Image (cartoon, rainbow, N blue to C red):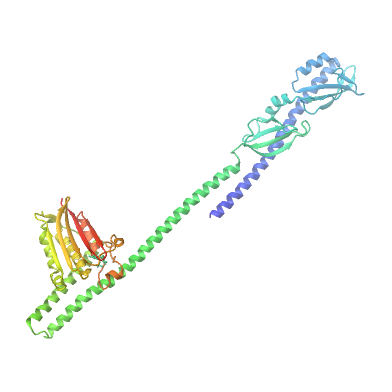
Amino acid sequence: MAVLGWVSLRQWERAADLLVREQARDMASMAAEKVEMALDHAEDAFVDRLQALLTARGVDPAALEGLIAGEPLVRHLVLADTRGEVRYPRGAAAEAAPGASTARARRSVKARDVGPLVATFGLDVEALRRDVLPASLGPLGSGTILAVFDGEGRTVYAPATLEGAQPLQSVAFRAHLPDWRLTVYQPGGAAPRDAVRGQTRLFMGAFVVLLVIILAGSLLTWRLTRRETEMARLKSDFVANVSHDLKTPLSVIRMFGETLEMGRVTDEGGRQEYYRVITREAERLSRLIDNVLDFSRIEGGRRRYERVPTAVEPLLREALDAFAYPLQQQGFKVELVVAPDLPEVAMDPEAIGQALSNLVDNAIKYSAEDRVLSVAARVEAGELLLSVADRGVGIPAAEQARIFEKFYRVGRSDTQGRRGSGVGLALVRHVVEAHGGRVTVESAPGQGSRFTLRLPLA
Ligand code: ADP
């Protein structure tokens, strides 16, 4: 499109140029013709008056003197008879040098008592410049400059400065002013070429803007598509992960239930152990299903929170109690530090409890050899801070912002063997933000992680 536009602008430029030159040629010929006609007129008028005088008074030097004085355009009048003898002015050569005058005109006249005579005269350049040229050329050439140059190329007449102006066409005069030329100029900056240049620049500018918009749009589309592809991949991972997470506790429950049913476990202590495992796995299932259901409620904008003044310590203990079995089984050291005199805080205890459970679940899931779980609560700067810390695998700094996105899970190697849906932290963030708070994470790979829920007290 740019090339097409540029080519057509160039063609337009050439066509406009051609047209202007053609018009300039017409204008120049017309102007030269007009000057010639004016000079014809002036000469005829003068010769008429001369003829009248000669008829009435013969070759009367005083009368001729008077006639010439009244004709500023006429210079060097010489009257010679048919034998070439000069009758006027007395003693002058028939072909006297004309001085500052144009080529000489030659006309036949008749004088009383003398008979036929040849009158020659020149035209005064100054009078031409002053009277004839402005009168003839002035009304012509709006938008252009008409200038006249003499045989030596000197400017005789120019109504405006020629500096920066572009000569378009030049013509010669016909009879009266041989060697003189009339030239049509385009004033500086007014050439159609300049206008086209302006258009070309405008077009190019507009095209560059268009190009930038197209590029920006393509970039945006590309990024959106990439995000969508990633989202699709994350979603299919999510389905696979959730299915797996549902299957594992179910098969444990089924296996243990069948074993009990077949009466294979004979001692009471063993049976109790089996019951506990079944209960624990059922709890895990509930938590997982709650998470997924809540997540879908959040996505659909249907999750509602009911805030009531809630005591903080019992909430924390409840969340930890739910994990008492796995914590004890895996040999975790559990620390709970609750600042004294914590006020009751308005919150949806179920939702915050679920958020804490997700954090504790993650802390257990992503711990390695150093199994320490620290849960703390305190008030700082008008906020209730609930933190859950572990000394597990940690999270690389570059990933810390993304782990709160739905379905997002840190690269395989760190989370290898640890299944998860990738919606736990998205849920946590949604819950605290719905409470007007926020969740922060401090973590270093290999050192552990601390997640803190910050809820406003007011
Ligand atoms: P998941 O079901 O995968 O645990 P989450 O939304 O709970 O999903 O967590 C997102 C990702 O954040 C996890 O896959 C894990 O890589 C990382 N993560 C969350 N908690 C911890 C933690 N305590 N220690 C290390 N990594 C964590």
Q: Which of 90 and 105 is in front in this view?
A: 90
If the picture is divided into quarters, which one holds ligand 1?
bottom left
Q: Is residue 240 above or below residue 162?
A: below
The answer to whether residue 302 shows anywhere in this view is: no
Location of residue 420 in the rendering, given as x and y in whole percent from the top left corner: 25, 69
Name the quadrant containing residue 32. top right
Location of residue 259 in the rendering, given as x and y in whole percent from the top left corner: 14, 83
Q: Which residue is drawn at 24% across and 59% down?
A: 442
Q: Would you say 258 lies left or right of 91 here?
A: left
Q: Nearer the viewer, residue 6 or 132?
A: 6
Q: Which of 94 and 339 is in front in this view?
A: 339
Q: Residue at x 28, y 69 (%)?
A: 414
Location of residue 312 in the rendering, given as x and y in whole percent from the top left corner: 12, 58
The answer to whether residue 332 shows anywhere in this view is: yes
Location of residue 428 in the rendering, given as x and y in whole percent from the top left corner: 22, 61
Name the quadrant containing residue 222. bottom left
Name the quadrant containing residue 50. top right
